[in-house]
Image: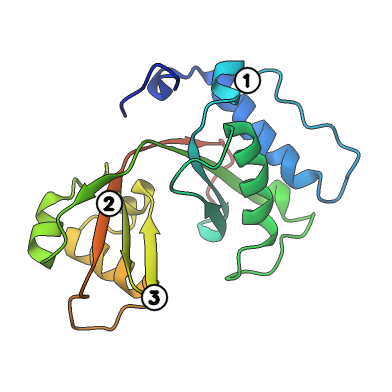
């Protein structure tokens, strides 16, 4: 993932910084039940904390998805986005009921810090699939009335390009069996930071 002078090199984040980012996300969720809880981001370097980075926060309960919310383009300082999307993933993902307090210790958190969007050819399915790099690319598809994205981590469940694109089209509600007109596609890379709670 390329870094700019104003954006820290995400690949070089040390274990302590990664742990501090995960801790902040978990604190943000806890503060839903404990409003007086002070969210502590002091262990995160200011250059990273204030960097304009897009991010997603994902929760898994065992092997099952329990919430995932984020943004594809920066919406402000990283720490503010992490706090906002951690709470949104826990309580505002429309696919799931709000997280209960007893569930949080059982949930595995992962953070995806996104690099910039880069356009991909999408006039034909074959050219889009040929351009994808499995295991590396996140994919964002849009057309009038539809949009959907898969983070790079989804390749672990859908390692085949055709299946990856098919399931993303399904997620976005595009009609089955025909290639969408006016489809636009972008790739992005992401640094995934995952806590060490066992998957099962």
Residue at the image position 54 percent from the left and 56 percent from the top: 68
Closer to viewer: mark 3 or mark 1: 3
Callout 3 environment at 10 Å: few (<14), some (14 to 19), or many (20+)? Answer: few
Helix, strand or loop at label 1? It is loop
Q: Position of residue 154 (x, y in %)?
A: 36, 54
Whether tag 2 and tag 3 are in contact, CB under 8 A, the answer is no
State which quadrant residue 190 falls in.
Answer: top left
Identify the residue position indicated by label 3 in the image.
145
In front here: 189 or 46? 46
Left or right: residue 142 versus residue 64 is: left
Residue at the image position 53 percent from the left and 26 percent from the top: 51
Among the two numbered marks 3 and 1 on one chain, the one whose residue lies closer to the N terminus: 1
Identify the residue position indicated by label 2 in the image.
186
Callout 2 environment at 10 Å: few (<14), some (14 to 19), or many (20+)? Answer: many
Residue 44 disc label: 1
Q: Position of residue 133 (x, y in %)?
A: 19, 45
* As drawn, 113 above or below 180: above
In front here: 61 or 79? 79
Among the two numbered marks 2 and 1 on one chain, the one whose residue lies closer to the N terminus: 1
Q: CA distance from mark 2 to mark 1?
A: 30 Å
Helix, strand or loop at label 2? It is strand
Q: Position of residue 147 (x, y in %)?
A: 38, 66
Residue at the image position 31 percent from the left and 61 percent from the top: 141
Residue at the image position 59 percent from the left and 25 percent from the top: 50
């Amino acid at each position: 993932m390329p870094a700019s002078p104003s954006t820290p090199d995400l690949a070089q984040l040390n274990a302590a910084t990664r742990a501090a980012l995960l801790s902040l996300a978990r604190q943000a969720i806890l503060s839903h039940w404990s409003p007086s809880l002070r969210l502590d981001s002091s262990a995160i370097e200011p250059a990273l904390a204030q960097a304009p980075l897009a991010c997603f926060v994902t929760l898994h309960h065992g092997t099952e998805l329990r919430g995932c919310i984020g943004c594809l383009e920066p919406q402000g300082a990283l720490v503010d986005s992490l706090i906002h999307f951690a709470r949104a993933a826990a309580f505002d993902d429309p696919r799931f009921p709000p997280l209960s307090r007893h569930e949080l210790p059982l949930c595995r958190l992962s953070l995806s810090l996104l690099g910039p969007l880069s356009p991909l050819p999408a006039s034909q399915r074959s050219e889009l699939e040929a351009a994808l790099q499995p295991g590396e690319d996140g994919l964002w598809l849009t057309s009038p009335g539809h949009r959907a994205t898969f983070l790079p981590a989804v390749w672990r469940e859908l390692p085949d390009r055709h299946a990856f694109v098919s399931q993303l089209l399904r997620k976005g509600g595009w009609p089955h069996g025909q290639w969408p007109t006016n489809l636009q596609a972008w790739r992005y890379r992401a640094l995934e930071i995952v806590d060490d709670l066992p998957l099962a």
